[in-house]
Image (tube, rainbow, N blue to C red):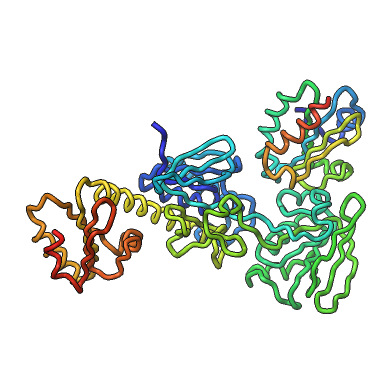
Amino acid sequence: MIELNKDNFEAEVTNYTDKHVLVDYWSDGCDVCVELMPDVHKLEAKYADKIKFASLNIKGARRLAIGQKVMGLPAMIIYSKGQEVGRISPDEIDENIDNIDGFIASFYKNL
Amino acid sequence: MEKIYDTIIIGGGPGGLSAAIYAARSKMKTLVIEQKRKTGGQAATTYEMENYPGFPSASGPEIMDKFREHCDKFGVEFARGKVERIEQLEDGFLKKVITKDDEFTTKTIIVGTGAEPRVLGIPGENTFRGKGVSYCATCDGDFYEDLDIVVVGNGNTAVEESMYLTKFVNKITMIVIHDEGTMDADKAAQEQIKENCKIEYIWNSTVAAINGDEMVDHVMIKNIKTNEVTKLDCDGVFMFVGTVPRTDFLEGLVDLNPQKYIKINERMETNVPGIFACGDVTNKMLRQVVTAASDGAIAAVVAEKYIEEEENWEKNVLKCGKPALVAFWSPINSASLDAITNLEKLHAGSTDTKLVKIDAYKFQRIANRYGVSDIPTILRIEDGQVKNRITAENMKELEKII
């Protein structure tokens, strides 16, 4: 899982073209995000061949996150060639890793 | 052999954890099933908590960590999962608790699943979720540094979370449905918030719609007295308009009130024998950590009594191998003491029947099941059926039934 920040976001997400990229938006204050994180790491092993996993702590990268139209946590966006192609919002995640798994799987099967 | 729990507690909030502490401490085999990785329920994400007795300055998460530590000390087991349904087994005593990946068997169940924030269903509320509409201050507060937000609601949660959000935001406008100066929050909370210069109020109003392009840009505020609608620019909307109980999995099994809270009596019993409930999920007046903890303690003690009562009845009356003479008595009822003494005298030396004494006050459930309203009452039970019933009125017939 790549740790994103203001400096590497462009290279790792916006200008990255090799694979799809999943960005896990989180912050230390978001207990649900922290709780889900270990399971998201496990999903990485399952999907890493076709999807690159990355996370962005919005602390210190708030404007960057808002620029990606993220204003609620936890949120995950899948990018293809720098463009958003899918997103799962806090209510869709519903604190449940299975919903995240389903979201990623629906992209993975068409890759 | 399959593992049978004495009690399974569904939900690891303050109510469930308190029930677990009481149950495990009295040597019941206890399992807590919690959906989340971290126990503590809503209290675990409530930083401002000033009213849990004995902890004047600890936060919600700190107190909940202590609850968990206390459970671990007494050997409470924990499992992670979302309970999908409960099944009553044929014997009417054991129950199955079913999660997506697992099944557990238990003698009693204590439901402490709590409640979750209410979604009002305002136009735009769902569209902008995660893009400016939030239900969790600690999750999303960071985004709103120096921005202007609207808070909908005026209860304790709305006030406490607004106080927390003023650490980040430029300005909060609270939309209050009541007349000027009237809020649902308690007085202490109201006084605190009044001193906060970052918070402004719009009274007699509700949010009619949340609007924006891709992110929240403004809300439409409706004055409920004049019906006038005005536009208010903001970057986010936090909704704190009460909670709804998590009882979907109980529908059709346990009696719920019209708002879907579990109906309980003062012993935390639901309408289903062996299923109890505690905390925010119940139909109660005050939903606090301290009241949930109290409910949990009661539920665990009553559950323990329930098991004792049922197992004792099963073993000594229904499956004792001969007719049973059951005497319902009470230590504070002198007539019943006399009747017991008399009965014991008459029964001495007899081996055809078994004499069983039941404290009708302590074991009300059994007394009620057999319609025992007067004490003393003596029943002759054969093959699970009541053959004779002796009360004060026909006490002279006592000899006959022996």
Query: Which image quadrant: the N terminus of chain B?
Result: top left
Q: Give above or below for B64 relative to B376.
A: above
Residue at far left of view: B349
- How many numbered tags mark residues here? 0
In-image side of B107 versus B68 (left or right): left
Image coords of residue A4 (percent x, y): 81, 32
Image coords of residue B269 (percent x, y): 45, 59
Image coords of residue B376 (percent x, y): 22, 68
Q: Which is nearer the eye, B215 or B165?
A: B215
The residue under the point 61% across, 57% down is B245
In-image side of B139 versus B102 (left or right): right
The residue under the point 80% across, 34% down is A23
Looking at the image, can residue B288 be seen? no
Query: Which image quadrant: the C terminus of chain B?
Result: bottom left
Q: Give above or below for B383 relative to A52.
A: below
Image coords of residue B128 (percent x, y): 83, 52
Residue at far top of view: A49
Q: Which is nearer the eye, B194 or B216?
A: B216
In-image side of A51 versus B46 (left or right): right
Looking at the image, can residue B291 be seen? yes
Q: Which is nearer the eye, A104 or A30?
A: A104
Quarter location, residue B27 = top left
The residue under the point 20% across, 74% down is B393
Quarter location, residue B367 = bottom left
